[in-house]
Image (tube, grey):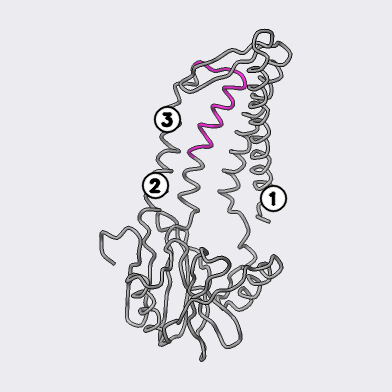
Amino acid sequence: MKGTTLIGYRYEERGDLLRIHSANRLLQALLLLLLLACIGLPLLLRGELAGRSGGDMVVALLALIALPALGVACAWYFPVRETLELEGVGRRVQRCRRNLFGGRARVEEAFALEDGDRLQLRRTGAASAPVRLWLLGRDGGAHRLSFETVAVRPGTAMTDAWLRRIAAHLRLELPGEIVGLPPLQPQEARARPALSASAATTPGTRRDEADAIAPGIRAVLALLGCFLAAFEATQAFALLRAVFTGTLYASFWRGRIQVHHWDGQPASFLLQASVGLAEILVVGVLAWGCLRLALAGRLR
């Protein structure tokens, strides 16, 4: 892979072991910018706390805490680095993922090669669905070899070189044409991870943690949920006060505030009140979702 390539593969060969690393510098840069923005934005807005009090102060404080925590959690838990390890003589394959900083390694799958295995390019669903590289066994088992951060594009020089490197190291034939499969039904989609988990050979790996949420992510979701709930409460209180007093204050970009009176502007008052109600409902759903995930600790 050339040094100027933003998205591609990096190969590392040591004796019989071949490591193929995903290199998506664009995604890494975006994630790093998100981290810097989540940390820098509260620092730039900390002066706004001076003129706030009551519920607005609580919302601002939660925002100052939740945003940096969100950025750090995304950088730490998002698996932006992927590695495929191929052992030719030992006939073993392992696929693992790491975060932006190269830590928190997680083995996604590890298995042994058998006689009769073959490579196959698959596309599940519509013609626009991504193409994946799979290793098919004689018993019908399938193991994915392709990455999530680098797209498989047959016919391009990068993908063809990647396929040849894998096939040569595993002593297998190159995959043929792309095989299109129908979309998975919900029952089949739930059963397939269970089959692949039972076929894995990595000892001591818990496969029931695939849908579990990491403790750090749960803490960030709890902070976001509290922030959204506090923000929703302040907005609901302001809307109720506007309904009872007949005066609604709408804030716009750069802090500009516009006042709507029920007596003189009933149409604009109802419009702004409807927008405020919709905002409260949306924020409430988001707050409930964050808090539910934080408490349950598991994705459905």
Mark toward the viewer: 2 or 3: 2
Residue in front for this viewpoint, 110 or 153: 153
Magenta span? 51-68
Circle nearer the N terminus (1, 3): 3
Q: Nearer the viewer, mark 2 or mark 1?
A: 2
- Gap between marks 2 and 3 measured at Cα: 17 Å
Residue under pointer 3? 43
Instruction: Give the residue at x 63% y 59%.
Output: 211
> How far across and how far down the image is residue 290, in percent?
64, 43
Outermost residue, bottom side: 115
Residue type marked 2: Leu
Neighbour tally class for label 1: few under 14, some 14-19, many 20 plus, Cα within 10 Å: few
Residue labelled with disc 2: 32
For disc 2, the neighbor class at 10 Å (few under 14, some 14 to 19, many from 20) is some
**Looking at this rendering, what residue extends furthest in the left direction?**
3
Secondary-structure class at tag 2: helix
